[in-house]
Image (cartoon, rainbow, N blue to C red):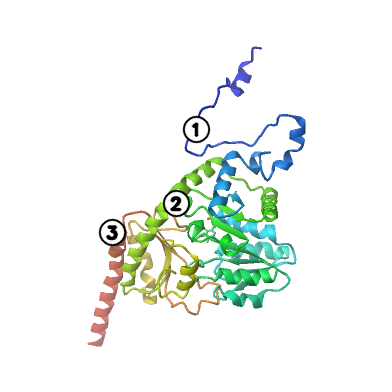
Amino acid sequence: MKRSDDTSHIHPPERSQQPFQAVAMPVERASTIVFDDLEAFEKRAERVYDGFSYGLYGTPTSRLLEDHVAQLEEASRALVVPSGMAALTLATMAVCRSGDRILMPETLYGPGRDMILRFLGPLGIAAQSYDPRLDAGIAELLDERTRLVWVESPGSASFEIQDVPAIVAAAHKASALVAADNTWASHLLFKPLAHGVDISMQALSKHASGHGDLLMGSLAVRDEALFRRLKDTARFLGYGVSPEDCALCERGLMTMPIRMRHAAASAAEILAWLSQRPEIVRILHPAMPEHPGHAVWKRDFSGAAAVFSIVLRPELAPLQNEVLRRMRLFKLGASWGGVHSLIAVNDPRKGRTSLDWLPSGPVWRLSIGLEAREDLIGDLEQAFALFVDFATASKAEGRRAAE
Ligand SMILES: *Cc1c(COP(=O)(O)O)cnc(C)c1O
């Protein structure tokens, strides 16, 4: 039957797709998915956890990425969502109901803490912050209402290491679940589920995506009922991810171990250089032997990420802006784990009572990228020269004042 031009614009001639076997992940877009018969259509809701019913609930591309993340996390199931923040929100909302209580470390990712306090609080979900160094001592904070314990090790900005297995043991004894924001280490350097954690969360926007151009988060679990609760909650919230983003994320995953190893080796050299600098009073990185969490980090992690903080002398605070502006390679910006080296200036002391150990002074978080090490050190050196000029000038001024 001859078709009208209008129809032909929608139905191209059929052509076999076989054999076409690319090594790259195929990008399959869909909102609409069609069914062979009425029975299949009426039962489409059964396909929400596996298979395909509507683009929002999964495409071949998103399912491939989820299977890959599950494998890397040593999980049975994984879910990808539009951002790390979405993953944090989803895990919390799937587990907690009105009347439940959450324990979260003071170091939990700031926007996540805000979401728990300001969004879930008014919905009747209580939250208590705890000192991230509490470890097994968390047992005293657990009660029969506590449904969920968040951990984040190392902690945002201040890099305290938590004894995750000890926290898991205490939480499980009190019938609470444990969720880990594992964005710093990623599945590559720490496997939360293998350490007893119930929900492993990470922002794939960081190490996995790796190029500062993609937002995505993941949740991985070993329990099918928990997976279904997460998937249902994602459905209710309307969380879906684009297949293009999934394929980009998959491309990032393929080079992630090599990028992370390279950045970690650069970070080690940069840390050695920073250790010699008089401007710096403390380096916050668990791979440093003097870090209080070093032994636990060594026990539980298989390596170090190239993300850490430094504490500058307090008297250098007024010079920060000039020094940051003088940097050519290090850019001032949030996020981490990408090919570009970044510095973020955050005061972790805000709203936290457990930081009495942190010396005073500005805190900079550095994320080491893939630029050549010598160029990165050169960049820091030329920018830090301004600190040196300042120190020389203030010494001269001191001498003049003394004369
Ligand atoms: C970046 C980050 C998140 C949020 O991820 P987005 O994809 O940017 O929403 C959550 N937790 C930690 C520790 C992060 O660094």
Q: Earlier in the sequence, mark 2 or mark 3?
A: 2
Q: Position of residue 230 (x, y in %)?
A: 67, 53
Question: Which residue in the structure is indicated by mark 3?
Answer: 374
Mark 1 highlights which residue? 21
How far across and down, in percent of the image, does residue 55 sit? 64, 39
Numbered-mark total: 3
Q: Residues within 10 Å of mark 3 (few under 14, many from 20)?
A: few
| The image quarter in which residue 276 lies | bottom left
Above or below, 234 relative to 265: above
- Tell me the SS state at disc 3: helix
Residue 256: numbered disc: 2
Amino acid under disc 3: Glu
Under circle 2, the secondary element is helix
Q: Quadrant of the N terminus?
A: top right
10 Å neighbourhood of mark 1: few (<14), some, or many (≥20)?
Answer: few
Which is nearer the N-term, disc 1 or disc 3?
1
